[in-house]
Amino acid sequence: MAAGAGVLSKFLPRTGARLPMTWVLEALPGLILLGFGMATIFVPLQDVALAGIGGHDAGVASAAVHALR
């Protein structure tokens, strides 16, 4: 996630009202890295948070994790 945010912070201040294709070339790599980082962090975190929860309380626990995320 940090790599994606770093790429975005480096390139987005330079983007102005230019062609839409330059946005794809400058911002998309950072957004892809950010999305990959979020997927690799939040999915295992969800598993760890719900590991000891029984089936009866799983819905409430999942809602609490989503509200705090």
Image: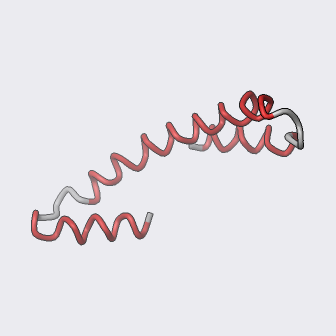
Q: Quadrant of the C terminus?
A: bottom left
Farthest residue to the front: give it: 20
- Which image quadrant for residue 22? top right
Q: Residue at 23% across / 59% down in the picture?
A: 50
Q: Is residue 9 left or right of residue 16?
A: left
- Which image quadrant for residue 63? bottom left
Residue 52, position as x, y percentages in the image = 16, 61
Q: Is residue 24 above or below residue 10?
A: above
Q: Residue at 85% across / 33% down in the picture?
A: 19
Residue 42, position as x, y percentages in the image = 41, 50
Q: Is residue 21 above or below residue 58?
A: above
Q: Is residue 13 left or right of residue 69?
A: right
Instruction: Please state the total of marks drawn on the protein image.
Output: 0
Q: Nearer the viewer, residue 28 or 68?
A: 28
Q: Residue at 28% across / 59% down in the picture?
A: 49
Residue 67, position as x, y percentages in the image = 41, 69
Q: Residue at 44% across / 42% down in the picture?
A: 39
Residue 14, position as x, y percentages in the image = 87, 40
Q: Is residue 9 left or right of residue 28?
A: right
Q: Is residue 27 above or below residue 53?
A: above
Q: How is the image coloured?
A: secondary structure
Q: Quadrant of the N terminus?
A: top right
- Which image quadrant for residue 40? top left
